[in-house]
Amino acid sequence: MSETTKLRLPFLAAAQAQKHVTHNEALLKLDALVHLEVLDRDLSVPPSSPLEGDRYIVAAGASGAWDGESGHIAAWQDGAWHFYEPQIGWLSFVRDEGTLYVRVSGGWAAVSGGGSGGGGPLQDVTLFGLGMEADALNPFSAKTENVLWTTKTVSEGGSGDLRYSFNKEALANVLSLLFHRNFSGRVEVGLIGDDDFQIKVSSDGATWHEAMRVDGATGRTTFAQGIAPLPWVDVTDASTIVINAASGDKFRVASSGTRAVAKPTNLVDGMRFLLRITNSAAITLTLNSAFEPLSGTAPTLRLASGQMNTFDCIYDAAADKVFYTWY
């Protein structure tokens, strides 16, 4: 054997004359290949004015002085091009891209970003684990407390928008987000076996209940389990009865004496609510001027002890009125 296996450095033969020639040839190879960094990997013809020590990965379709050397390392040494055939597993940093490449079967492949700006592609990674080990079932895995995704701004050449795209193959496939507790499913959201948007819930990760479905063809929303009504809100009895409209949609109070119902707070246009006043004793009752009967005629309120007045109300922000029916 006259040379080494990997770098093909020439051996000094026994009783060889001019051993320095062979030795210097080996040093040139080491200088060209150890800590391999090339200027470019996209040139198929050599640059016109290379500097001593410049190295390149020769691009496909090489011609001129690089003819037949595609994929090889071209190094300008002692006023001439020297070529070195890379082996699988060799690493090379490509300066103009700021990217590290590895020699694989069939060519060079990017393995990570690099450079002073941290740029460069990360391509064809089969497993990626952040803070944990990825596996075949979860080839992209992360263990962290916070995740931030932010748009590329207009000043950076972006649009200012940020969209996530998820894709499934066929109608019957599943495309969803699954929320776990201690790795047991509790909520699933997405296209679950069809193209309707669904929300499903589970208390044990085994039995699932559909909570909501939005029909993909019509946009119609249905709630398979119905909508649970809000509970009654008990209002504090006082000479002025105050209702916080944001706290519910059904309000009740037991009152006696002289009482006035104030204009509810936190009203929202189109909001509907019930107000039920039960007379625990005889009562005198008035409504704030914001209340207006839908019929245009104010009802005769029930004022005796044990009687009840119920107001079915809806707020019109344009008129700033709480229109009501009474029963």
Image: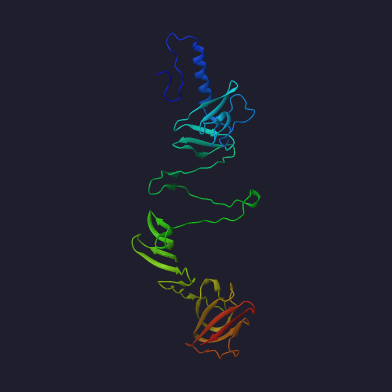
Quarter of the picture containing the N terminus is top left
What colour-coding does the image apply? rainbow
> In which image quadrant can residue 93 be found?
top right
Indicate the position of residue 115 as horizontal and vertical percent values: 57, 37
The furthest residue to the left:
206
> Does residue 183 show up?
yes
Is 89 on the left or on the right of 287, as rendered?
left
The mark total stands at 0
Using the image as rendered, state which of residue 97 and residue 177 is in the foreground.
97
Indicate the position of residue 309 as horizontal and vertical percent values: 51, 86
- Vertical comparison of 34 with 179: above or below: above
Using the image as rendered, state which of residue 155 and residue 194 is in the foreground.
194
> Does residue 131 show up?
no
Indicate the position of residue 64 as horizontal and vertical percent values: 58, 30
Residue for point 44% across, 68% down: 212
- Vertical comparison of 146 with 262: above or below: above
Using the image as rendered, state which of residue 325 and residue 14 is in the foreground.
14
The furthest residue to the right:
155
Using the image as rendered, state which of residue 205 and residue 256 is in the foreground.
205
- Vertical comparison of 244 with 134: above or below: below
Residue for point 63% across, 49% down: 157
Residue for point 54% across, 31% down: 67
Indicate the position of residue 229 as horizontal and vertical percent values: 45, 74
